[in-house]
């Protein structure tokens, strides 16, 4: 069991916060200096300018923030309740877990850029799209850690409950639920900024109020102070939510919460079982799609079923043109997505390694890393495009930023999990830090690194499509936005299906690489 949260542990937390304060001050000073050096470029507003704007327009910002926070909070609650319900189904029926997680992943891979306009047509005016997108953005990040936590208790605990003649309900309440709490809080911390992002994306689709609406206005007016003010407020709110959930976890939990971003690879059931599970996921998804169209009586001009998408891609007179347009858009997106994804992975793992080798820089690096994780991509996109332009560099940087933080946190956690006994052996031979890093720490890091790499696939797709939608006007994100504005619903629904399937396949491809690498360096993870 992990060390208890004693008074010494709390003292260490306070000390780490004190060490982080100088790094935050350096970050603010550097931001202000950069803004003053780039005054004539009109691309960067410093902290003093941002503060002046927020003070002047505090009433407008407060109303917008209240609207977005309300929608995000409702979505956060709904998404996490859904995650708990799905975890309960998987726990009650273990053989259904792979199907449940497969369906959850497929829905999680739905591109928010295209889902938002579809939900706007379904719901009409109101907060429905914002709340739904916030829920969709969070449920998977809570579901997977929760499933891990529900099985995290030692088998001896279950034997003890049975020895007292207690049943499955007592086991659930006294063992599984308590064991899952650290994982649950870790998932909630990741989900909180995601809910705020989902609500803002929903506001882009035609809402009347909210931070997303102000962001659109700032982009159209090229209002640099307003854009940076919105980004600063959104980042601050996300960071506060992240910290608040962590503080609540420390009050509730007896053990330090682990950082779990995705379930470790389970026991292999063979290729046939995997194909059967994939087939079941496909059939259930198609059945649910048809059932939803029939149950809600949706207008066929807008609501397209699987047969409509198949016809649009292969049977209609313009099917070849549709496929050509989709292929061209996906090619443009891949040129930015893949380099950004790989750059984010390398940057996250590289910074984690650097902090292990040079711990003194942690006070400066951690505030910046948390800020990069918390700032919503919808406010980051216009800023990065202002600074770096609409070309490849800006898009790649934004995708890398989206991938960076989960990879960094997971890799740092993994590096610190190196077995103490093995480290003692290396110490006895006076091995240097680089030798211990290469021989012990990096192999220990690999499971957490690949867990983050799998979760980063949908995140990178979200990042690149949002940038294409808001800023560059290229790629599949722009195509989906244009299709929605022109009511070309065949193209829109085809894009949604294609992006979702390709995201899920990318997730599976990273999982295949993970199994091959872990089979060499960490075979116990595949046992």
Image (cartoon, rainbow, N blue to C red):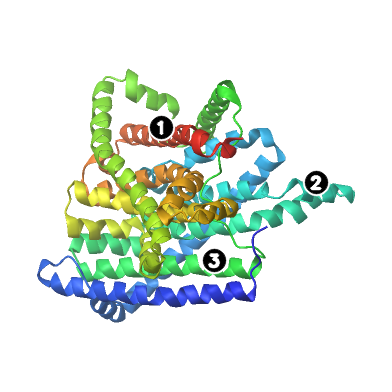
Camera-side residue of 391 and 439: 439
Q: From the top left corner, tell me how far across and down residue 435 is, in percent.
A: 43, 50
Q: In this view, does 449 lie to the left or right of 295?
A: left
Contact check, label 1 and label 3, Cβ < 8 Å: no
Quadrant including the C terminus: top right
- Considering depth in this image, is 318 or 328 the residue closer to the camera? 328
Task: Give the side of residue 397 with respect to residue 78, left or right.
Answer: left
Badge 2 element: helix
On residue 253, the disc is none
Q: Can residue 416 be seen in this view?
A: yes
Question: Residue 29 falls in which quadrant of the image?
Answer: bottom left
Q: Residue 304 carries which label?
A: 1
Q: Where is residue 463 in the image (x, y as percent from the top left)?
A: 33, 49
Q: How far apart are marks 3 and 2 (CA)?
A: 30 Å
499, above or below 191, in the image: above
Q: Is residue 45 left or right of residue 347?
A: left
The residue identified by callout 2 is: 168
- Whichever of labels 3 and 2 marks the residue nearer the N terminus, that label is 2
Say which residue label 3 marks. 245
Disc 1 to disc 3, C-alpha distance: 40 Å
Viewer-nearest residue: 19 or 176: 19
| Disc 3 element | helix
């Amino acid at each position: 069991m992990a060390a208890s949260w004693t008074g010494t542990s709390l003292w260490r937390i306070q000390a780490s916060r004190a060490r982080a304060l100088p790094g935050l001050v350096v970050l603010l000073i550097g931001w202000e200096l950069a803004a003053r050096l780039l005054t004539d470029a009109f691309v960067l507003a410093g902290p003093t300018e941002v503060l002046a704007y927020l003070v002047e327009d505090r009433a407008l910002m407060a109303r917008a923030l209240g609207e977005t926070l309300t929608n995000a909070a409702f979505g956060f609650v709904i998404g996490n309740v859904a995650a708990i319900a799905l975890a309960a189904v998987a726990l009650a029926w273990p053989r259904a877990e792979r199907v449940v997680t497969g369906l959850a992943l497929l829905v999680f891979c739905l591109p928010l850029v295209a889902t938002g306009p579809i939900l706007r047509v379904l719901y009409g005016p109101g907060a429905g799209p914002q709340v739904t997108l916030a829920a969709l953005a969070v449920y998977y990040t809570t579901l997977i850690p929760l499933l891990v936590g529900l099985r995290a208790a030692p088998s001896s605990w279950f034997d003890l409950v049975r020895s007292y003649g207690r049943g499955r309900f007592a086991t659930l309440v006294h063992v599984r639920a308590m064991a899952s709490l650290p994982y649950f809080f870790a998932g909630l911390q990741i989900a909180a900024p995601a809910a705020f992002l989902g609500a803002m994306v929903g506001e882009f689709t035609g809402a009347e109020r909210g931070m997303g609406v102000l962001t659109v206005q700032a982009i159209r007016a090229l209002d640099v102070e307003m854009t940076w003010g919105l980004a600063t407020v959104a980042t601050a709110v996300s960071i506060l939510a992240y910290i608040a959930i962590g503080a609540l976890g420390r009050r509730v939990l007896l053990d330090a919460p682990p950082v779990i971003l995705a379930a470790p690879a389970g026991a292999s059931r063979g290729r046939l079982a995997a194909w059967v599970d994939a087939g079941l996921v496909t059939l259930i998804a198609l059945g649910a799609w048809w059932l939803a169209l029939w149950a809600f009586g949706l207008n066929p001009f807008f609501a397209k079923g699987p047969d409509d998408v198949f016809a649009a891609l292969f049977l209609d007179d313009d099917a070849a043109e549709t496929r050509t347009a989709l292929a061209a858009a996906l090619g443009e997106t891949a040129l930015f997505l893949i380099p950004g994804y790989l750059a984010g992975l390398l940057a996250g793992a590289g910074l984690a390694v650097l902090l292990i080798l040079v711990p003194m820089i942690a006070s400066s690096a951690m505030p910046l890393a948390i800020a990069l994780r918390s700032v919503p991509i919808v406010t980051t996109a216009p800023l990065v495009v202002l600074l770096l332009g609409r070309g490849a560099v800006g898009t790649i940087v934004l995708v890398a930023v989206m991938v960076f933080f989960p990879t960094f946190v997971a890799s740092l956690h993994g590096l610190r999990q190196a077995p103490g006994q093995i480290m003692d052996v290396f110490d006895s031979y006076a091995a240097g830090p680089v030798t211990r890093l290469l021989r012990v720490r990096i192999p220990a890091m690999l499971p957490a690194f690949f867990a983050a790499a799998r979760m980063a696939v949908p995140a990178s797709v979200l990042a690149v499509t949002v940038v294409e939608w808001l800023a560059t006007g290229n790629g599949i994100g722009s195509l989906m936005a244009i299709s929605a504005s022109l009511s070309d619903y065949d193209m829109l629904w085809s894009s949604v299906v294609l992006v979702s399937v390709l995201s899920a396949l990318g997730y599976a491809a990273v999982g295949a690489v993970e199994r091959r690498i872990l089979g060499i360096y960490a075979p116990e993870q595949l046992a």
